[in-house]
Amino acid sequence: MSLAGHRHAQWALAAIAFVESSVFPVPPDVLLVPMVLADRRRAFRLAAICTAASVVGGMMGYAIGALAFETVGRAIIDFTGAGEDFTAFRQMYGQWGFLIVFTAGLTPLPYKVFTIASGVAALNPVVFILGSLASRGIRFFGEAWLLRRFGQPVHTFVEKNLWVFSAWFVVAITGGFVAARLMF
C-alpha cells in the first residue's frame, strides 16, 4: 500500500508486470489493486501500463524459451528420448497456442510458464502477442474497471472467489473455442 502512493509507483508497476511475465513469481495485481483503490480516476491508465509491460515481459519470456531451448533444452529432449513427445507437444501448441496463451493470461496460473513454453514450442510470435494482449488487457482492464466502479468490496469478493471465477471463465472460453473449431 505504501508503494502504491509513491511517486515512482507507475514505474514499479511496469517493472513488476514486466518481470512477472518472464521470471518473477509475484503478479502485478498486488500493486495494481492498491494503486487503483488509491486513485480510481487513474484506473485505466494503470491497467494500460500493466498490460503493456506484461506483454513486453511476455515477449522476454518467449525469447527465454526460444533461446534456452536451442542451447539447453534440445540436449535434454534428445538425452531423455522424448523427441516424439516433444514433437506432439509442439503440434498441439501450434494448433491451440492462442487459446493456451489467452487462457493462461486470464488466470492466476504463473503466466511466465506459458510465455516460456510458447518460445520453446516456437508458437507464431504474432499469435503469441495477440493472445497476450487480449488476455492481459481483459484481465487488467476488467480488474481496474471493477475496482473503479465498486472499490474495496469487489476486491474482497473477487480475491475470496478467484479460483471459482477463473475456472468458470476457462471452461466458457475453452468451450467456445472448441465449438467454433468444430463448426468451422
Image (cartoon, rainbow, N blue to C red):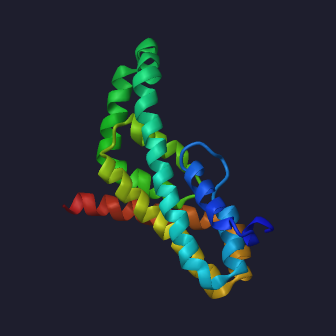
Residue at the far front in the pictured view = 7
Q: Quadrant of the C terminus?
A: bottom left
The mark total stands at 0
Residue at the far top in the pictured view = 79
- Identify which residue, 170 or 67, lies in the foreground: 67
Residue at the far left in the pictured view = 184
Q: Quadrant of residue 41?
A: bottom right
Residue 28 falls left or right of residue 141: right
Q: Quadrant of residue 40?
A: bottom right
Q: Is residue 168 visible?
A: no
Q: Quadrant of the N terminus?
A: bottom right
Q: Quadrant of residue 10?
A: bottom right
Q: Horizontal and vertical percent for residue 129?
A: 37, 54
Q: Horizontal and vertical percent for residue 30?
A: 70, 62
Q: Is residue 5 visible?
A: yes
Q: Residue at x 45, y 63 (%)?
A: 135
Q: Is residue 52 above or below residue 69?
A: below
Residue 123 falls left or right of residue 18: left
Q: Residue at x 34, y 35 (%)?
A: 90
Q: Is residue 69 above or below residue 145?
A: above
Q: Residue at x 47, y 36 (%)?
A: 64
Q: Horizontal and vertical percent for residue 46?
A: 58, 72
Q: Residue at x 30, y 62 (%)?
A: 179
Residue 17 falls left or right of residue 130: right
- Identify which residue, 23 or 171, lies in the foreground: 23
Residue at the far right in the pictured view = 2
Q: Is residue 40 above or below residue 75?
A: below
